[in-house]
Image (tube, helix red, strand yellow):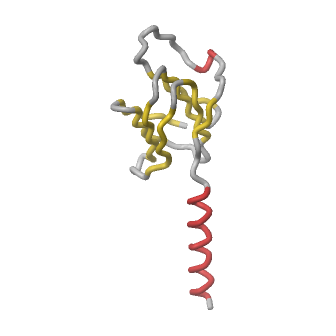
Amino acid sequence: MRQLFVILLIAFAAMLAIGATPRWETVDAPGRIFTEQRLDPEWIDVAVRDNAIYIVSQKQVNVKVFTILGQLVSQETLPAGTHRLQMKAKGIYILKIGTTTRRVTI
């Protein structure tokens, strides 16, 4: 009986984890989040604020977010604009944006 309970608990936790995958959302971010302005049309800017990762891009980009241990947290293709990914856990994450890789700390 105890083993059945443990198995059901693990299965329930796995279902919650699958449904809890963070999603990118389009936002109108205030200018103070980003520390520098660039005129190059190919730039991508990344900022972290209030447990969220912000990305600003002038073109469509593929974004992958990994934990420091290499576990995939999020994978999406984002259109041009400002986007936010609200993170549930603090820590160090690796962002792969197109061909660029950056480390961010939340």
- Residue 87, placed above or below residue 45: below
Residue 2 on image: x %, y %: 61, 88
- x, y percent for residue 34: 56, 18
41 is higher (above) or lower (below) than 77: above
**Percent of width and height locating residue 99:** 33, 31
Rendered residue at 45%/37% (across/down):
63
Considering every residue shown, the one lying at the far left of the view is: 99
| The C terminus: image quadrant | top right
- Residue 17 lies in what quarter of the image? bottom right
Give 23 or 2, whichever is nearer the viewer.
23
**Residue at (52, 43) in percent of width and height:** 91
Residue at the extreme top of the image, as rendered: 39
Where residue 41 appears, x then y in whole percent?
43, 13
Q: Nearer the viewer, residue 106 or 102?
A: 102
Front-most of residues 5 and 79: 79
Image position of 19 with respect to 100: above or below: below
Query: Which residue is painted at 50% across and 26% down in the image?
Result: 46
Left or right of 100? Residue 13 is right
Q: Residue furthest bottom?
A: 1
